[in-house]
Structures are given as structure tokens and as C-alpha cells.
Image (cartoon, rainbow, N blue to C red):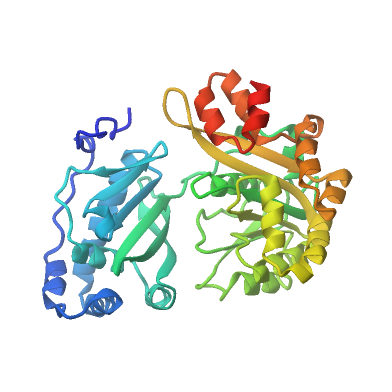
């Protein structure tokens, strides 16, 4: 049972068996007391960051141990995310367990100044610069998890009504096997460099849909299957892959390279076989990704979209109308596969993966060039023999197997009419 199971309307708390929170180091209050009352918003945060830089190593270490305790409680609760900071959190630490985000009321609430200092203690000078310029900073964080293994987290610090807020997401200590994700053998084969050595594959879904888990499973499978060079460009870099049969390079945007575009362009001179682009988030990154794919490399990337057709349309829509026909043609020529996925509440607790898969055959390529979305969907609907499936078909499969309820399936269907036809 989730440790938050009794919290709906009753203000429950984390299990008593979890690690108890230590006292916040005393120097944190000293920084708060020294902050001028007239300093507000970002000025207040930057003042506190400057004071934090003057703190000695021992006190900084104690504050890091305080943060590590929060993350230890997160891991013991099987939570995927932790949130704190800003007035919106009401001074509480919030955990997402089995897809639901709820507060932990087992400790006294923090003040916004306290969470400002806690979050600032995690940031480097480069992160502070990003926060100043963009009002947000992405970074990675690691803490020991036992047996000499580091538990890594993807983190975003940002502003919430002029105060610091933080989200941290746990990264799996070990990648899942590609086989465990349930792809059709044709698709599984197509994801492997040994069998298909070029083309662009997109893993798409909303935030928290498991895109990184799927991508890491694909990288791990290839790393153990062929002798070559894999380059991963991320912001931040999440899972760190050991070099097995492949040498696996990790290049973090902001730390190892200035932008996704620069990382992609530089990769052309680094003799890669596979290139992994953390996210295609702007026309410059998309164009560079299409270029390196067109040069004969096998490329993987992610998008925040909920279906295969939407993914194609999103990429094309990033460009002005005068360029969209050209981009649609370029995309059709290099695209190999789109996997669009969702994580759904599972009967009995936990979550389960539902996915839509487009494998780009010659007819699909022509449909992309002709901007015919309905044809692309129908090809997936009828394409089981070559590994394709619509989200609605996969939801129906999970429902028939008793893994999700019909209500959950209908709620998450992109095309509810098609799903109801199946039912």
C-alpha cells in the first residue's frame, strides 16, 4: 500500500518506518535573518545565494545530508518525484507515488526562505546564472543509495511567485530490458543498430510518461549488442551508461556543450554510430537532428506529444509556413519509428505502460509528405503484422487482460470514438 493511502482528506503522513527528518542546520536561519527585509523576489534569492557561498564546507555538507534525507524518504516510498518550495507547496514536501502527488504532513512546514536556501544549496554558479536569465535551471544530482551505487535525479529549480521551487525526479539505478517493454519483434529489431543502422526514432509522451526509461532501455540493449560509439546529448544527462560493447559518451548541455544544436553538429566530427538527443525542443535542434540523421546515423530523440500523428505535426509546426512542405519531406525521408506512450494506473496498484507505435513504411512516408493524418492513423490500426498499433488498440488489450479498468482506458484514449468501437 502507498504510504499516502490514508491522506485523502485526513492529513496522513509517511510511514513511521521511514528515515526521520533531521533538524535543518542552524546556519540556514542565520542567512535568513541577515537577508534585508526590503529585498524581494529574485533580488532576495540572489542575496541568499551570495551568503550561502560564504558558508564553510562542514555546514554545506550538513545541508547536503539534510537534502539527501528527503531523497532517501522519497526512494523508500517508491515515489517518482519530489516537490518543495514556493508558497504553493504550503511549506510541505510533496511526493508523487503511483502517479498521484500528495504532501507529507509528518514534519513541520518550512518557510519560503528556508526552502529558498535548501534549493539554492543544490545549484552551481552556472545554475544560478541560468536562474537569473531564464528563471529556471535544469541540473542533475546524485546521492549514495547503498552498495557503492549512486542514485541519480533529474532536477529543475524555478521561480514560483518570486520564490524558489524545486522538482526532482528519480532516475532508475538500472535500465529496464528492452524485452520487458513489450514491443513487437519487428519493432524491437528495428530499434537495434545491428539490424537498422540509420533513421530517426522518436519516443514521445507527456511529462512523466516514461520516455527516459524507454530510451535508456534502447540504449542499454544496443550497448550490449554491437561494437560502436553512442553519443548522448542531454539537459541534464540522466542515466549514466557504462561502456560495454560500445563506448558511450555523455554530453550535458551547459556543462560539456553550449546547446543541443552545437552538440549535434560537433558529434558529426566524433565518429558516432548512434546519437541520442535529449529533446527536440526548437527548430535549430530539429534541423540539426534531421541533418545528422540524413548523414547516415541512427538517431533517437524525445518529444512532448501524445500521439504519433501529433508528433509529426508538432515538428512541422515549429517552422514558418513557407518552410513546412520542405521540412515535412525531409522528416518523411529520415523517420523510421515513433513510439508514443502513457503510464496508466494499474488494477491493484502501480502503473503500466500503454503505447502507440508507427513504423514508417513506404505508404506511411507518402502519407507524411502529403499531410494525410487519417491515413497514417489507419496504417497503424491495420499494421500489426509489421509491429504497429494505435494507442486505442493497446488500451483495449490492457483492459481485456484485466490490467486497467475500462474507465481508465477511455480516459486516456486519444481517439475515444475508435476505442468505443473496439469495446
Residue 385 visible, this angle: yes
Vertical relation: 198 (above or below) 322:
above
Residue nearest the viewer, comparing 130 with 254: 130
Q: Quadrant of residue 135?
A: bottom left
Residue at coordinates 67% horizontally, 50% vertically from top-left? 310
| Image-based side of 88 in relation to 284, left or right | left
Residue nearest the viewer, comparing 69 with 33: 33
| Image-based side of 157 in relation to 362, left or right | left
In which quadrant will I find the C terminus?
top right
Vertical relation: 265 (above or below) 421:
below
Q: Quadrant of residue 29?
A: bottom left
Residue nearest the viewer, comparing 51 with 223: 51
Vertical relation: 412 (above or below) 301:
above
Residue at coordinates 28% horizontally, 56% vertically from top-left? 88
Counting the numbered discs, the total is 0
Residue 245 visible, this angle: no
x and y, in percent, of residue 63 in the image: 22, 62
Residue at coordinates 30% horizontally, 66% vertically from top-left? 161
x and y, in percent, of residue 117 in the image: 24, 67
x and y, in percent, of residue 244 in the image: 62, 51
Residue nearest the viewer, comparing 108 with 408: 408
x and y, in percent, of residue 20 in the image: 18, 44
Q: Residue furthest front?
A: 417
In which quadrant will I find the N terminus?
top left
Amino acid at each position: 500500500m502507498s504510504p499516502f493511502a490514508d491522506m485523502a482528506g485526513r492529513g496522513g503522513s509517511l510511514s513511521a518506518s521511514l528515515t526521520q527528518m533531521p533538524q535543518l542546520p542552524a546556519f540556514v536561519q542565520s542567512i535568513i535573518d541577515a537577508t534585508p527585509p526590503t529585498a524581494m523576489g529574485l533580488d532576495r534569492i540572489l542575496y541568499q545565494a551570495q551568503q550561502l557561498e560564504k558558508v564553510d564546507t562542514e555546514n554545506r555538507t550538513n545541508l547536503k545530508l539534510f537534502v539527501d534525507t528527503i531523497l532517501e524518504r522519497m526512494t523508500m516510498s517508491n515515489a517518482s518525484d519530489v516537490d518543495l518550495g514556493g508558497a504553493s507547496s504550503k511549506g510541505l514536501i510533496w511526493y508523487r507515488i503511483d502517479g498521484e502527488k500528495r504532501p507529507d504532513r509528518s514534519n513541520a512546514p518550512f518557510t519560503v526562505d528556508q526552502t529558498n536556501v535548501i534549493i539554492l544549496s543544490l545549484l552551481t554558479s552556472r545554475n544560478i546564472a541560468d536562474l537569473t536569465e531564464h528563471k529556471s535551471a535544469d541540473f542533475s544530482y546524485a546521492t549514495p543509495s547503498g552498495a557503492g551505487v549512486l542514485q541519480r535525479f533529474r532536477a529543475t529549480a524555478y521561480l514560483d511567485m518570486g520564490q524558489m521551487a524545486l522538482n526532482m525526479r528519480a532516475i532508475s539505478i538500472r535500465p529496464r530490458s528492452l524485452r520487458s517493454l513489450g514491443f513487437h519483434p519487428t519493432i524491437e529489431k528495428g530499434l537495434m543498430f545491428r539490424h537498422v543502422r540509420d533513421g530517426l526514432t522518436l519516443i514521445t509522451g507527456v511529462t512523466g510518461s516514461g520516455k527516459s526509461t524507454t530510451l535508456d532501455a534502447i540504449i542499454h540493449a544496443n550497448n550490449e549488442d554491437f561494437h560502436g560509439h553512442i553519443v548522448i546529448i542531454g539537459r541534464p544527462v540522466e542515466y549514466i551508461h557504462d561502456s560495454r560493447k560500445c563506448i558511450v559518451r555523455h554530453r550535458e548541455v551547459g556543462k560539456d556543450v553550449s546547446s543541443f544544436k552545437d552538440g549535434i553538429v560537433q558529434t558529426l566530427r566524433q565518429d558516432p554510430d548512434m546519437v541520442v538527443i535529449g529533446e527536440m525542443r526548437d527548430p535549430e535542434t530539429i534541423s540539426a537532428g534531421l541533418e545528422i540523421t540524413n548523414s547516415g546515423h541512427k538517431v533517437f530523440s524525445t518529444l512532448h506529444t501524445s500521439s504519433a500523428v501529433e508528433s509529426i505535426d508538432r515538428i512541422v509546426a515549429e517552422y514558418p509556413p513557407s518552410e513546412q512542405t520542405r521540412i515535412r519531406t525531409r522528416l518523411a525521408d529520415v523517420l523510421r519509428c515513433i513510439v508514443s506512450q502513457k503510464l496508466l494506473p494499474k488494477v491493484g496498484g502501480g502503473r503500466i505502460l500503454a503505447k502507440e507505435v508507427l513504423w514508417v513504411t513506404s505508404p506511411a512516408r507518402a502519407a507524411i509528405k502529403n499531410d494525410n493524418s487519417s491515413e497514417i492513423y489507419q496504417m497503424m490500426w491495420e499494421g500489426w503484422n509489421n509491429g504497429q498499433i494505435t494507442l486505442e488498440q493497446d488500451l483495449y488489450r490492457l483492459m481485456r487482460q484485466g490490467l486497467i479498468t475500462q474507465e481508465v482506458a477511455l480516459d486516456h484514449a486519444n481517439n475515444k470514438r475508435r476505442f468505443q468501437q473496439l469495446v
